[in-house]
Amino acid sequence: MTFRILMSSLVGTSVEFYDFYIYATAASLVFGPLFFPASVSSMELIGAYASFGIAFIARPLGGAVFGHFGDRVGRKATLVASLLLMGASTAAIGLLPTYAVAGWLAPALLCLLRFGQGLALGGEWTGAALLALENAPKGWRARYAMFAPLGAPIGFALANSLFLVLTLTQSAEQFADWGWRVPFLLSAPLVWMGIWIRFNLVETRDFHAAISKSKPPRVPLLDIFRLHMDQVISGAFGVVACFSLYYVVTAFALGYGTSELGYTRSSFLMVELGAILFMAAGIVVASWLSDRIDPERILIFGCVGTIISGVVLAPMLGSGSLVVIFLYLAFSLWVMGFVNGPLGAWLPGLFPTRVRYSGTSVAFNIGGIIGGALTPVVSQALSQYSGLVAVGFYLALTGGLSLIAFDASARRKALGALAQSEIRYRSIFEQNHVSLCEVDLSLLWKRLEAVRAYPPAKLRAHLNATPEFVDQCSKFVRFVDVNDATVLLLGRESERDVLGSIDRFLPPQSELVQAIILGMCSGDDRVEMEARLLRSPGNEVTVIFVIAFPEDKDAFDRVACAMIDVTQREQAQEALMAAQSELARVGRVATVGAISASIAHEVNQPIGAVVMSAQACMRWLQANPPDIKAASTAAERAIKHSMRASEIIQRTREQVRGTRRRLESVDLGNIVTDVIGLLDRELMSASVRVTTEFALDAPKVLADRVEMQQVIANLVTNGLQAMGGTPVDQRDLTISISAGDRDMVRLQVRDRGTGISPESLAKLFSPFFTTKNDGMGMGLAICKTIVEAHGGSLTARNHEDGGASFEIVMPLSVEEPEELPEATAQGA
């Protein structure tokens, strides 16, 4: 389907631009004397160019009509209708009588059919661009959208190649008599081919998504002029350079070269056919760069190239050398690729999806009037009365207009993004339950001017020797903005009570300000430390204080910082230390210390969850008014996690006593879900995303539930720690359950870390072996013992896509519960 979409965009626009350009070529070569006879040849040419410009007057109307139905009915039907209208108008031109036969009726009919061409092309380019753009994957929008602009050089090459063949095979009389009609009549089979391709399309993803959210506007054009007029103006002037450059170096240059410079039609057409290849190459290169940089920046480069093309037009086009003229046309059409190719991605991006067809069509076609309708006429008149220098100045002027439009659009986009960012920042800042604040350090930075150059050791010694200097500096650390969580943390009633110097909240001998001074003078990007703050006299709160310094030293007036209350964590750690001491004693009795490390590690998880739930309960109770329902929910979670910790400790005592236990039929999927809930805090802190893939429905095994929870929790924790150095957007942990061989179930835990080194892989499950510096991590040997005691196996390997994969294979539950072997209790 992707191939058909891109081919539909390319073939459709190629056919329509073919129809459009055979008129431009015929207008330059024969339409003047055939339909607009005059005593002066230049007036004939101006008359032919004027009829050429009628299509540009019709294009905005066509854009409005096709845009209306494109936004309301869909892209597919609109594209088929535009192609039919273009084909019918073009074929009819090939059947028109000339002025010598029908008099004034001939130019009138010619202008009417030219109007029909413009009406059709007014909706074609936009529809073809949207068809590709709205189906493009992420990062490929410009390269998909380029297939619509690529129709221009392909259509031009088809049109001019056909005229070249006719010019070489016919005499001037034959060509003027009937040969010029052939390209127009051949449009009919080309149009049929384009319609056949488009009939098999489906609507774009973006259009389906837009109409599923809300009904399309009744009159999209009214919404465009009422809500998006700035974008219309920017878009219109942005495409001026594209049109003016193209028609100066194709239509005007062809007419000027054959009438003023005296070149034959065939020779000049061959030169233009060779140069048009540079336009196609320029579109491809510019679109590729747009996906990697930004469409606006590439379009700005193209505008600069347009100005250069205008500057060198007179000396190169008027040089009298076909080689120099070819170089000029090749350069200008290469530049044309840069002001045309990215338009398919840039221009639709100015408007929301629900009015995108109308907005893009109107802007594109108004720009076509400004830059394309008058360009051949103005250029011919300027060259006739003022010379090529005036034409070059006109071209450079249009390039400057588009440059200003792109620059203004870029500035508006930047300001809009800044405003949206500020709105999001304020929303996060105000609604976040974490204490966030902004601190003014500008006065402190000035106060430190005399000591900034000190080496770190000397500065630390100076601060230790002059505590009064540090006390003075604390008055220059000032809160300038805080959220409600900060007011609550510091025990104040309002934001106004917190704003001001930080020294009011510092207990005696606080090292917080000294750490801030050292960080600022050392050029660190942040300071993170545990500190104590005064909520009220005699009432302290322990926080993790984080402050991020800006790279710009002039931006110290608003420095972001955060404070996390860990007071209850300190109390929980004291209780945890007592539990770990008891567990260490049991471990020495059981397996010479290995089990103590594992059990302490496992107990830490539910206790940590208890602390987090208790903190949440306290916050809801302290809210004004208290949220009893939320507090009850948090308390229930704390009870659940406390019971989990109690179960682990109870099982440990049973293992020490060698008590036999009966296995039960447990659902591995439920155990995995419970473990993820227990480790929720660690997963969130490490920004790890967990994906579960359960291919079996209720995969039950005979096992001890608590021990299996410990095994899976250990494997998940290992994966979490293995991804510590992995970029945040790649921290994915996958837990899958699938069927194994011969009534076995397979559970895999796969991380996206650095993998296991070959030397560690060989002894990963050896007793007392660990890869961690703190000596923890010996639980893998115990995990393997537990799994094997349940009749299963535990293996590890490095995954071919990166990271490590641990695999547990166990028999499915098909027997009555049995007693756990003595080896399990002793081995675990």
Image (tube, rainbow, N blue to C red):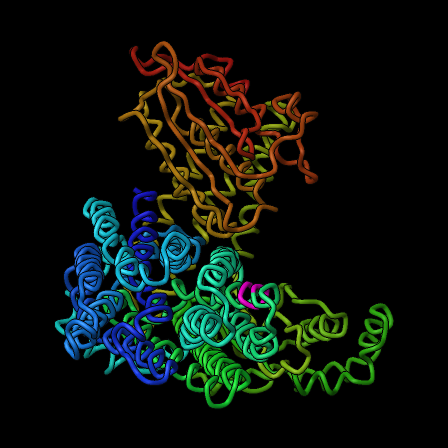
Q: Is residue 636 left or right of residue 81?
A: right
What secondary structure characterizes most of the magenta part?
A: helix
Q: Magenta span covers which residues?
A: 326-330
Q: Residue furthest left?
A: 218
699 displayed left or right of 481: left
**Residue 215 versus residue 801: which sits nearer the camera?**
215
Q: Is residue 501 left or right of residue 773?
A: left
Residue located 31% across and 63% down the image: 125
Residue 736's x, y, as percent?
40, 30
Query: What is the x, y in percent for residue 180?
Result: 30, 61
Q: Residue at x 56, y 64 (%)?
A: 326
Query: Quarter-wise, where is residue 313 in the image?
Result: bottom right
Front one among 163 and 172: 172
Quadrant of the rendered structure where residue 130 is? Answer: bottom left
Q: Residue furthest bottom?
A: 385
Above or below 610: residue 483: below
Picture layout, residue 67 above or below residue 196: below
Between 568 and 351, which is closer to the camera in this rendering?
Answer: 351
Classify 721 as above or below 519.
Answer: above
User: Could you tell me if residue 341 is visible in this image?
Assistant: yes
Q: Is residue 285 magenta?
A: no
Q: Nearer the viewer, residue 814 or 464?
A: 814
Is residue 545 something that shows in the picture?
no
From the image, which quarter does the N terminus lie in? top left
